[in-house]
Image (cartoon, rainbow, N blue to C red):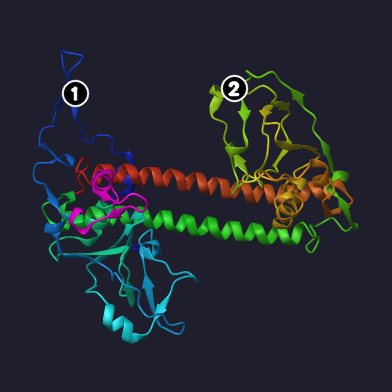
Amino acid sequence: MRNGQNHGFKRLLDDTDSPTPSVESNNPCQSVIQTPPGYKQTEVGVIPEDWDAVPLGTVTSDIGDGIHATPVYSSTGEYYFINGNNLRDGYIVVTEETKTVEHSEFKKHRKDLGDSSILMSINGTIGNLALFAGEDVVLGKSAAYLNVKDSVSKLFVYHSLQTEPVKRQSSDGLTGTTIRNLGLGTIRNTTIALPPTKAEQETIAEALSDADALIESLEQLIAKKRDLKQGAMKELLTGKKRLPGFSGEWDEMEIGALCHIEEGEITRGGNTNYLEIGDIDISNKTYGISGKEKLSVPGSVKVPAGTLLISTVRPTRGAITITMETTYVSSAFCRLSIKNYFMFYVVCQNQFLTYLGENSKGGTYPTCRTDDILRYRCSAPRVPAEQAAIAIILSDMDAEIAALEAKLAKVRQLKQGMMHNLLTGRIRLI
């Protein structure tokens, strides 16, 4: 699955000639869908005339689920007990919480899994998938298996299970209230669009798998870059590693010596470019304001570009960012005027976030006061130029990560377009 040559990938990105249904009507209250020549309308949408809309039950030799009982666990067991939450992005993922069993339990409860098997989560979390690759596992009741017939491409079915028409059918067939459940009968009756030959199915699956491989490689590269940045922060923000040209002393000081409160201007509301705490992505310290349509509220504060914002109230405590332009912000932010981005990286460290929690007071919404934030102690070089140089290094690393994340988002979007076009036959590869 992961070792393709991007067959058809570039070609698809440039193709603009895919057939689409047209709508013609003289009556504005009525629409008539015109099916393109060579295509037909089915329950899964418009597909080529030589394709079929078939239930999953007809392309599989068996559809079943895991055991509906609790096996005998063993801390020394070599076989994992797998449920739906262990199925992610095409793989079986084990964690520290994943239970294990001995060989006797494995032999007692194992299912008929093989090279043709696809695993799917069907209880609680619905629709997560994994391609079975010979792992010695025992399935729990929240994991189903689909054994695809030899005459059909397993990878084509795997990709088809991720399409919106299939997801809609699954959603329509869910049972249960508190915990949702996807029944085996619903899975068997779920319809997919199927090309007439296995060769065409495999060609389509290969192109989509190449896109998956590109996505996976970008995810791994981003994770590596994030780890490198964390390591750089630990060394550069403590003085363990010095940049060329700097050798002066570092001091331990309160961050109030490096910045001051940005008072801002209290507004009456009605201004655009308003930033709320919920707009900040806590994981990467960036924010997105929903365009000029978002108006500030009475009591918001107008702050200049370069203002460091820190959310100090649960559950958003630790939402941190720097304004890129003049912005109207919630008065709930701690607002700091900083000389350079060095302070931004100081407060992005885990020890500062721990300090926020330990120094928060109050009942329903514990809050860390700005005065307490300014008393937080950190190590910093005496020379502002070294602070700025450190910040530039870390900012460059952030920019590289952001560029990779933007590329990843684009590839994911393109892959969705590929799925829509390839799995409905709007674009034919052969």
Question: Which residue in the structure is indicated by mark 1?
Answer: 23
Label 1 vs 2, first from the N-terminus:
1
The answer to whether the residues at label 1 and label 2 have Cβ atoms under 8 Å apart is: no
Please report the bounds of the magenta region as a residue range: 162-186
The residue at 29%/69% (across/down) is 68
Callout 1 environment at 10 Å: few (<14), some (14 to 19), or many (20+)?
few
**In the image: residue 355, left or right of residue 107:** right
Question: Is there any visible trace of residue 28 in the rendered image?
Answer: yes
Q: Is mark 1 on a helix, strand or loop?
A: strand
Q: Which mark is residue 295?
A: 2
Q: Tell us which disc is closer to us: 1 or 2.
A: 2
The residue at 66%/59% (across/down) is 230
Residue 178 within the segment the image draws in magenta? yes
Determine which quarter of the picture holds residue 197.
bottom left
Q: In which quarter of the image is the N terminus?
A: bottom left
Where residue 324 appears, as percent x and y from the top left, is: 66, 33
